[in-house]
Amino acid sequence: MTIVLITVLLYLLATGLLVANFASSEAAGRAWLAPAIGAVLLHAGTHLAAWHGIGGADMHFYAALSLVSLGMAAMTVAVGAKGRMAALGVVVFPLAVLTLGGYHLHGHIAPEMLDWRLQLHAWTALLAYATLALAALLAIMLWLQERALRRRSIHGWLRALPPLVELETLLFRTIKVGFVLLSATLLTGVLFVDDLLAQHLVHKTVLSVLSWLTFGALLVGRWRYGWRGAVAVRWTLVATALLVLSFFGSKFVLELVLQRTN
């Protein structure tokens, strides 16, 4: 409980420092970085300690949410430390607080015994979800920045965002990395999951493939037709929504509604 509380306080401190910078109409300084790094390390330590206690990695609904937010927070720190996109922390860090709190309050569930191949599939999936969820946040920020520019009303935290072209470039780089990870997730699923089209996996598989196709079409559209702006935002959000439904939607129904943990 103490580690969780300290982690929450560090995340909130980092968020508060970012908000204070934006409220003062200054570019985000680096004071937020130390508590953010501490929070990410302790967040990871919370999972490692829990896994040590139960004898393996817990990847059920609340644990998966917390792990995805941990990945998002770690990437936010990595990108923000280079002086770009620290503003993401205003959304990502509170999200990490909520998901870590949910994981702690729900308790830990005995892990499924997975061999290294299925563990590789699961970890690749979580990395893909975290990366593409971050891409969705970047897309929303891109949309907000474009709308503010059209209205000539750049205020508060929008000033902390990089120039529009740089933000768009970062969005597509993130999507490319996420697309590669999602491709690896689908490939390892085909190779290592015995019955990929089982009743409780078929909808997950179909939605994941649809998300992969949507992200792929967006990247092709960007390369071939120069898609950007509102078009890129719409495709990114649709593809991310399909991915969220495929993984967390299915986990929610199976584990929390139907009470099935395997």
Image (cartoon, helix red, strand yellow):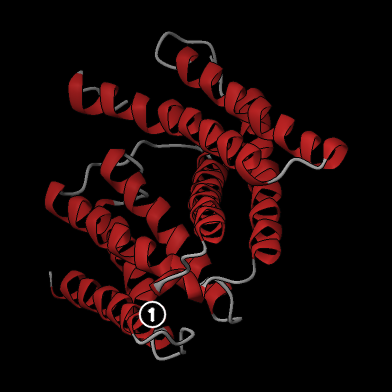
Choose between 113 and 31: the one closer to the eye.
31
x, y (%) of residue 138?
A: 53, 55
Task: From the viewer's perspective, tell me whether residue 112 is left or right of residue 203.
Answer: left
Considering the image in quadrants, where does the C terminus appear? top left
Q: Quadrant of residue 185?
A: top right
Q: What type is the residue that disc 1 sits on?
A: Phe
Q: Quadrant of residue 234?
A: top right
Q: Residue at x 46, y 14 (%)?
A: 203
Q: Which residue is mark 1?
A: 22
Check disc 1: other Cα within 10 Å, few if <14, some if 14-19, many if 20+: many
Report the number of numbered marks.
Answer: 1
Q: Is 244 located above or below residue 143 in the figure?
A: above
Q: Residue at x 51, y 37 (%)?
A: 237
Residue 58 in sight from this viewpoint: no
Residue 196 in sight from this viewpoint: yes
Choose between 53 and 147: the one closer to the eye.
147
x, y (%) of residue 8?
A: 22, 71
Q: Residue at x 70, y 43 (%)?
A: 180
